[in-house]
Image (tube, helix red, strand yellow):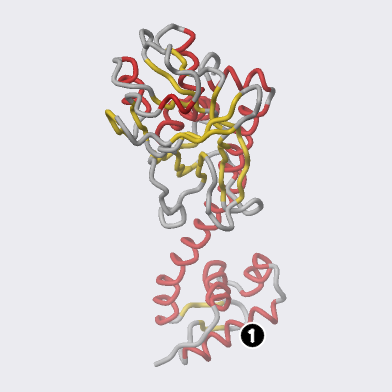
């Protein structure tokens, strides 16, 4: 048997059953009494069963009407709960945000900002997924993604946060006498960290461009900045390190910069999110928070990237 009736009619019937009166139910629903009476009658017609006994003074549920009411009312209570939760998403700073970010940038740069955000908004929770692989952010139901370099996430809005430069580093006791230009790096012991397998270098003064792809005498391949840094410090070879991680180590004498007049062209870091308008309030808070942290002023941005302030 195919049933064909309106959910609104079910809701109107439940209101009459709750109030025990068409008149009171019509006031509560803010609809004309005649419309309410007609819609409940239509529901009974569609179900081919009497739900209410009516007389001039009162309304009573039939036996079938009582069973129908008891089964229907929880459905509308659940729908109301869902509506309240959705409204809270739009107005309250609470709930979970799922985030995707690269491992190294996430640990060394983003983590301090996430922690500051959580301290400011105690009812918001972050579910952070770190990976150097390009995951399917739609498939993983990611709310906000951070990407270094170009991204191919169609229909996602990208907000630029900062630029990252990479510099060549070696152990503090490295003999750099023979290293005058990127061409001299050929065959030099090297530690390679994915995905930066090709070093696109630019001279700080002249703007000259050179590309170096380590191919000979690669002593170690890794996909983690910490492993890369440790290997370089231990003299395994030279490596290409992001400046936000390298500069504090260079300043403290733990690393030595190789060819300091050369660094890579800047790689942009972007924050991606799906919808500018219809988003939960917690997402808007995080987006605005991150933009402010990175864009307040150039000096603060530099200090934040190097971990000198939080």
Give the percent coordinates (x, y) of residue 28: 65, 65
In the rendered structure, the answer to whether residue 89 lies left or right of residue 177 reads right
Q: Is residue 54 shown left or right of residue 223? A: right
The residue closer to the viewer here, 267 or 310, is 267
Left or right of 196 on screen, residue 154: right
Above-or-below relation of 305 to 282: above
The residue sitting at the right extreme is: 32
Image quadrant holding the C terminus, namely top right
Q: How packed is label 1: few (under 14 Cα within 10 Å), some, or many (20 or more)? A: few
Quarter of the image for the N terminus: give it. Answer: bottom left
Total residue callouts? 1
Q: Residue at x 52, y 87 (%)?
A: 44
Q: Secondary structure at mark 1?
A: helix
Q: Residue at x 27, y 28 (%)?
A: 219
Residue 175 is left or right of residue 292, and the answer is: left
Give the vertical position of 284 relative to 290 (above or below).
below
Image-quadrant location for residue 282 = top right
| Residue 12 horizontal/vertical position (percent) | 58, 74
Front residue of this view, candidates 268 and 24: 268
Q: Residue at x 66, y 72 (%)?
A: 23
Q: Nearer the viewer, residue 100 or 231?
A: 231
When asked about the image quadrant of residue 98, the answer is top left
**In the rendered image of this protein, does residue 190 appear above or below residue 25?**
above
Pick the front one: 273 or 178 = 178
Quadrant position of residue 302: top right
Q: Position of residue 128 (x, y in %)?
A: 42, 38
Percent x, y of residue 102: 43, 38
Q: Which residue is mark 1?
A: 38
């Amino acid at each position: 048997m195919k049933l064909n009736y309106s959910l609104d009619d079910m809701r109107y019937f439940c209101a009459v059953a709750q109030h025990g009166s068409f008149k009171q139910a019509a006031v509560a629903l803010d609809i004309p009494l005649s419309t309410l009476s007609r819609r409940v009658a239509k529901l009974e017609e569609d179900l081919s069963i009497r739900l209410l006994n009516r007389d001039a003074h009162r309304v009573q549920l039939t036996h079938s009407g009582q069973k129908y009411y008891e089964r229907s009312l929880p459905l509308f209570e659940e729908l109301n709960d869902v509506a309240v939760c959705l409204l809270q998403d739009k107005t309250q700073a609470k709930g979970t945000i799922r985030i995707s970010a690269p491992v190294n940038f996430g640990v060394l740069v983003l983590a301090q900002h996430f922690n500051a955000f959580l301290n400011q908004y105690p009812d918001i929770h972050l579910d952070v997924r770190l990976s150097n692989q390009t995951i399917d952010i739609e498939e993983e139901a990611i709310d906000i993604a951070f990407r270094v370099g170009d991204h191919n996430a169609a229909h996602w809005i990208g907000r630029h946060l900062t630029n990252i430069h990479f510099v060549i580093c070696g152990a503090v006791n490295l003999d750099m006498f023979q290293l005058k230009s990127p061409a001299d790096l050929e065959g030099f012991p090297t530690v390679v960290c994915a995905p930066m397998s090709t070093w696109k270098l630019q001279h700080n003064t002249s703007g000259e461009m050179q590309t170096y792809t380590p191919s000979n005498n690669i002593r170690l391949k890794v996909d983690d900045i910490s492993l890369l840094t440790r290997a370089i410090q231990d003299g395994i070879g030279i490596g290409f390190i992001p400046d936000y991680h390298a500069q504090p180590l260079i300043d403290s004498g733990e690393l030595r910069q190789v060819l300091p007049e050369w660094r890579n062209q800047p790689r942009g870091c972007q924050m991606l999110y799906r919808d500018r308008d219809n988003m939960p309030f917690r997402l808007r808070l995080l987006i605005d928070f991150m933009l402010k942290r990175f864009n307040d002023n150039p000096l603060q941005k530099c200090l934040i990237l190097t971990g000198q302030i939080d």
